[in-house]
Image: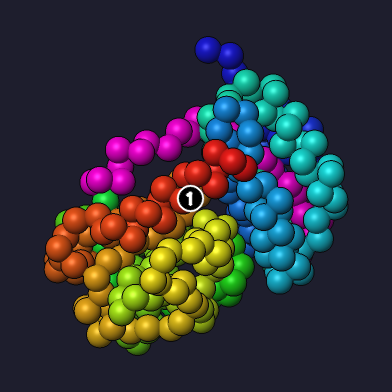
Amino acid sequence: MNAKYISINTQLFQEDEAKLHVSDLSIQRGFGIFDFLKTINGKPIFIQSHFDRFYHSAKELNLRVNYDRESLLKAVNELMKKNDMPNSGIKFILTGGFSADGYSIGEPNLVITQSPFEYDPSGFEKGTTLVTYNHQRQLAVVKTIDYLQAILLQPHIKQQGADDVLYHHNGAIRECPRANFFMVKDKKIITAKTDILKGITRSKVLNMKIDGYSVVEEDFTLNDLAQADEAFITSSTKNVLPVLVIDGQKVGDGKPGKITRQLNELFSELIRLG
């Protein structure tokens, strides 16, 4: 198999030759942002929406992106061409840059990686299970490289027999570490609006139309969730995925719901038409 390539500041390097100096703030302090998208048959999905969020995250962290959208798109396309990997996940990372004192922001480094990825539609029927945890992500509107809490919780998640964690803040539902959360209740499809990262798949779902249902951004609680008819998460890798069990309790009848199924079908069609 040919060596995989990585882009650093728009220059291509073989994976085993791609390096950043240890003084970079991403290493010294975990300071940086990123975004992630998937490609299907060589086409980046919703790339301009991901660029929107990437530039917004950079602005919020006072990181200068030295590349405009055209240059960033060119770098992504060159990497895809070099790796010849039509179905993949692409991550672009903006670091805090090399820092002489290990604390001050330097000149940011742009790293773009590509790994094999292909969505498995059979995962929809299996759904997912979550365990709740009281935690509020700092700088929630920014897609930072800080996943300390989520990684720290991995043993706890496994002990609870769950697949992932659902954060709440003193009872107010927030999000999963890598996905947004929705519930279906009283003819409404609801997702939290306060102190969350606004996902790209989430934004597409918010614009969908289901007869007899409204799709709303509205904060809700663990008590509200206990009465949900359906629940699901959304992300670039999972599309619209049913949540069947939360904290050991079935959501609805414990099977993928009809509204979740309709939304997943609409999202799949949106990708196809993309």
Residue type at mark 1 is: Phe
Q: Is residue 177 visible?
A: no
The percent coordinates of residue 177 (x first, y second) are 43, 62
Find out whether residue 4 is within the magenta segment.
no
Image quadrant in which you'd find residue 207 = bottom right
**200 to the left or right of 258:** right
Point out residue 77 in the picture as x, y percentages from the top left corner: 73, 32
Judged left or right of residue 38, residue 93 is right
Residue 40 seen: yes
Splitting the image into 4 quarters, where does residue 44 fall? Answer: top right
> To which quarter of the image does residue 168 belong?
bottom left
Residue 23 image offset from top left, x and y in percent:
69, 52
- The residue most toward the front is 211
Instruction: Please give the residue where the numbered disc 1 appears in the rendered image.
Output: 267
- Tell me, yes or no, whether the highlighted magenta stretch contains residue 114: yes
Residue 115 higher or lower than 231, as above or below: above
Query: Residue at image x 67%, y 55%?
Result: 49
User: For mark 1, does the 10 Å Cα neighbourhood hold few (<14), some (14 to 19), or many (20 or more) residues?
Assistant: some
Provide the secondary structure element on which disc 1 rests: helix
Above-or-below relation of 190 to 102: below
Q: Which residues are magenta?
A: 105-126
